[in-house]
Amino acid sequence: MSIATFTTSMGTFKAELYTDRMPITCGNFIDLANSGFYDGLHFHRVIPGFMNQFGCPYSKDPNSSRSGTGGPMQKTAFKNCNGESMLRNHDGCIPDEIGDGHPRISNSVGTLSMANTGKATECIIE
């Protein structure tokens, strides 16, 4: 079991990562967290009773009009939780693990999720 600890201006919380069920998504998140990608970011979208969103590098400036439009660097490498080397695509995206034989995990209250574009993405496994 992997646990991510989030330290915010409103306190600290922890989240369990389902590395066995979502090895690409979790590997991507762990790599970004360990690299400092999320350090200093603000929640750029807060909808009470629904969700809080962060992860955009432009949100380091809480007044940036670009908040919510950025992501990881394109074609950067990471390891998924199965130990396979992967490469983010030309947009810095990873493949969606929901559907096509992957287990469905609900986005119920307390769920940590990664946003996606809704488009199929290509990601190279080396």
Image (cartoon, rainbow, N blue to C red):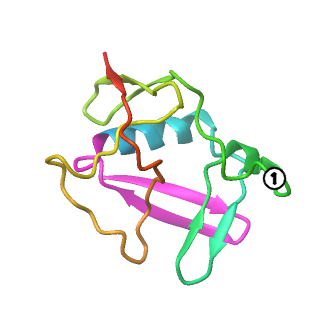
Relative height, residue 22 to residue 90 (above, below)? below
Q: Residues within 10 Å of mark 1 (few under 14, many from 20)?
A: few
Q: Quadrant of residue 62?
A: bottom right
- Residue 94, quarter of picture: top left
Q: Quadrant of the C terminus?
A: top left
Asked if residue 1 lies left or right of residue 29, the reply is left
- Residue 120: give x, y in percent of width and height: 36, 39
Residue extending farthest to the left is: 101
Residue 6 belongs to the span the image colors magenta: yes
What's the amino acid at mark 1?
Answer: Ser
Residue at (48% x, 63% y) in the render: 14
Q: Could you tell me which residue is drawn at 78 percent across and 48 percent down?
A: 60
| Residue 101 located within the stretch drawn in magenta | no
Direction front: furthest residue = 119
Residue 70 relative to residue 18: left or right: right
Magenta stretch, main secondary structure class: strand
**Residue occupying the far bottom of the picture:** 49
Q: Residue at x 60, y 28 (%)?
A: 73
Q: Residue at x 43, y 38 (%)?
A: 28
In the rendered image, residue 7, in percent from the top left (x then y), is placed at: 63, 60
Q: Nearer the viewer, residue 10 or 91?
A: 91
Q: Which element type, helix, strand or loop, lies under badge 1?
A: loop
Give the labeled residue for mark 1: 65
Bounds of the magenta segment? 1-23
* Above or below for 51 versus 123: below
Residue 3 vs residue 58, the one in the foreground:
58
